[in-house]
Amino acid sequence: MSDLPDRPADVVDLPEEADPMSALATELPDASGPLTPSGHLRRRQLISRGTETSQTAAALLAVGVLGIVVYSVVQRGASALSLDFLTKDIPPSGTPGGGIAPAIIGTAIIVALATAIAMPIGILVALYLTEFAARSVGRVVRLALDLLNGLPTVVVGLFVFELLVVGHHQSGFAGSFALAIIMLPLIARATQEVLLLVPPSLREAADALGVSHWRTVRGVVLPTARGGILTATVLAVARAAGETAPLIFVSSIFANTVSVNPFGSQAMPNIPVYIFNVSEAADPYGFARAWGAALVLLTVILLASVGARTLNRRYSMMLR
Amino acid sequence: VSGTIRIAGALPRNARARVRLTDRIGDGVLYGLCMFASLLAVVAIGAIAFQVINGASPAISRFGLGFLVHTTWQPNFGIFGAGTFLYGTAVSSVGALVLAVPIGISIGLYLSMVAPHRVRGVIGPLVEMLAAIPSVILGFWGILILAPFLQRHLEPFLHSVLGFLPIFGTTPTTGTGLFIASLILTIMVVPIVASISRDLFLSVPQELRDGATALGATRWEVVRGVVLPTSASGVAAASFLGLGRALGEAIAVTQVVGAGNFIHASLFQTGDTLASRIANQFQGATTTLHTASLFYLGVILLVIGLLANISAQVIARRFDVSTIASR
């Protein structure tokens, strides 16, 4: 990029309107002239810079929306938050105060039970895909997982309603079952990814020692992938904890007191359905509690998902 | 790596035989368990389809395929039709995609080509956090904060400037309706498109980009001439995955769409989608036919949702988009 200040600039700077072809034909700029963009090139660079600006703006827009939503929830939820709010029963609508303890406990139990169902199955499916499956069978299983993953959650709710609630009653277990269906493909797919990252040399070393397949899996493959499996599960939990659609079919008509038995004959209170029910009614006290509940749920979910993602990135980098 | 592996050769003979037996049993059990779990996953899809169709059977035998085009929904008279909700689903999803795909691709480009590395490490996770916000919270925020804002500012503005278009043709009333539903869906779809397209753009071979740059292409020309064409099918697949998400979203849409029973040309008026009608009326459904009709909506949703996903799979066969999506 040699800069020759003694040359007049207009030797190179073609007028903006000039047809570039005719300019080339008549007045080809001196090749030893300064390399400042002009005419057509300048327009191309302006376009390029313009698109970069709009791409930056799009990213800032997304971050801005996140900021606005989180700010609204924090600002309105913080005033509701207190020790009482976390430990007291839900009061009837139209009354101030009270808490959301039953919903917090219910969500914790439902999600824990769902994890207990989905995690082992998800890991086994992932093991099947990486250790055993023939190409064609593997493709079918992967397709099934992807379809499950893309299934509208409201359809999962209808399914579990028809399977477990019709002729019986709503229960926390039915909610867990529905959430487990949603978590299964997430855990299985992410675990499969991590299992594929386990260095082949470890496996080969075990094979060379004559170690049987299941001992290799138990002693080498799973321990190496432990961190990745854990983060996959945490991400799935974060997703399931806020899932509302299936629960309004299978665990929505609940009493406002703490219930700890997911297999009982009563639906279990839970945070997402509580917020949903409140948002459909016009009760200012209910709104205040719902903001508080939203803050509790959002805090847990965002912390879990950010933490898991950070760990996951570090972990896969380590394996790579 | 734990040290629980025992080496068969190092043990006395009778112990070796025992180990061999447990090895054979262990291998078999592991294989059986894995096989069974995978079978469960495959069977689940079939079971879900069967149960939902089963629940819908009274409505299917009563209304047949005419259900798809009839626009009357009157539970008190036992008349049901899905037309209004198919329209609402199409309008809100298409509206969301029209906004979300360009924004998502732009963010993907920003995160893969424009932003400095440090900034990528901050903005990328923030965009992914947007996807982690539960839909019920987004809907609650939509109805209490976004709707009043739209009603007072954005909708009157759009009406006064673009009011000659039928979609902005009526004066805004409550802020609820298909317009805000599309916006909320946009917020949900953008992170999906953004993170998948970022990974796709990053996987475009560096040599191709360098080659174009060496030929004198500007950054945008590299994007338009090399990056986008190389990853076009993947981006299309990402859009279909986003479409699947928008079609099936029930809760947030229910909260903001206003549960309208009629088709309006204007986006500022209420409407309803398949998923949100199910979520909205299921608890209050009293007659068998009403419940069955809601299940029938579920069948339609299942079919459309599966189609959107299979389209994404077919388009993306060259790229492993779905694994990126489920990460």
Image (cartoon, helix red, strand yellow):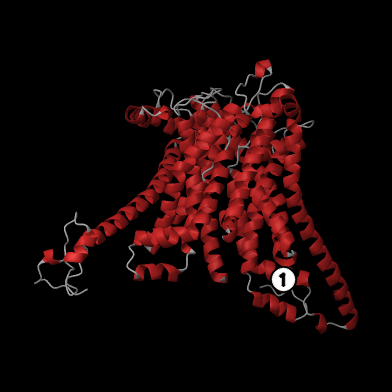
Classify the position of the C terminus of chain A by image quarter.
Answer: bottom right
Question: Which x, y percent locates residue A33?
Answer: 16, 72
State the residue position of label 1: A219
| Residue A108 seen anywhere in this rendered image of the structure | no
Query: In the visual, does B215 lie left or right of A115?
Result: left
Question: Which x, y percent locates residue B182?
Answer: 48, 36
Q: Does dot 1 land on a helix, a strand or a loop?
A: helix
Give the residue displayed 49% in from the left and 59% down from the top: B231
Question: Which x, y percent locates residue B90?
Answer: 54, 35
Query: In the visual, does A119 lie left or right of A214?
Result: left
Q: Chain of mark 1?
A: A
Specify the farthest residue to the right: B14
For the residue pair B42 and A306, the one nearer the viewer reads as B42
Compared with B296, B118 (above or below) is: below
- Other residues around mark 1 within 10 Å, as few (<14) / some (14–19) / many (≥20): some
Give the residue displayed 32% in from the left and 27% down from the top: B160
* Amino acid at circle 1: Gly
